Amino acid sequence: MRELAPFALLVCACGAAVHEPTPAPRPSPDPVEARTASPEAPDARASFEAMALRAGALAPGMHEASRKESDGQPVELVRADGRDACMRASFEATAPVKAELVDGSGRVLAAVETASATGVLGERGPVCIRKGDVVKGTAEGAARIRWVAWVAP
């Protein structure tokens, strides 16, 4: 009979563990609601983090090079100091813009076809520049723009 006491305690402990309720999962944000929310509402850090989390899908094998915010004026995203560089960039704007990536001489390297509040530049293949050159993000339109750039190792 003594041998059954530990077994009975073990069964009771397992039964208690099984019957504890699990916390309900937190609802995920509605993607439509997130896109239509006021652009000033989300914190800049949260917006940059959300953009950076898409790196696996948008820039596989690349590492983050910069996070910048601009008002449409050219902003330096990547500088090829030590060697040639290839990169991609994602943007989010407070209003639709015609976003472009340009090199140091102003030559357009990649551009969105139609004005958009979000997008990826270099999505069909990375944008590459020579050692010593720079890639800048620029946009036509009155908006605040957040940029995240990734560069190939």
Image (tube, rainbow, N blue to C red):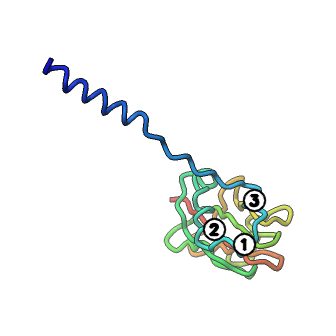
Three-letter code for the amino acid on which mark 3 is drawn: Glu
In the picture, residue 76 is in which quadrant? bottom right
Residue 84 position, x and y percent, is 56, 66
Tell me: 140 left or right of 83: right
- Please tell me which residue is depicted at 82% across the width and 76% down the height of the picture: 140
Three-letter code for the amino acid on which mark 1 is drawn: Val
Which residue is at the far front? Answer: 1
Query: Of helix, strand and loop, which one carries label 2?
Result: helix
- Please tell me which residue is depicted at 79% across the width and 63% down the height of the picture: 36
In the picture, residue 74 is in which quadrant? bottom right
Residue 92 position, x and y percent, is 72, 67
> Which of labels 1 and 3 is toward the front?
3
Q: Indicate which disc residue 102 carries.
A: 1
Three-letter code for the amino acid on which mark 2 is drawn: Ser
Q: Is 108 or 96 nearer to us in this picture?
A: 96
Contact (Cβ within 8 Å) of mark 2 with mark 3: no
Residue 87 position, x and y percent, is 61, 62
> Which of labels 2 and 1 is toward the front?
2
Tell me: 128 left or right of 63: right
Q: Is 31 or 1 nearer to us in this picture?
A: 1
- Say above or below: 51 vs 94: above
Contact (Cβ within 8 Å) of mark 2 with mark 1: no
Q: Indicate which disc residue 47 carries.
A: 2
How packed mark 2 is, by other alpha carbons closer than 10 Å (few <14, some 14-19, many 20 or more), is few
Query: Of helix, strand and loop, which one carries label 3?
Result: helix
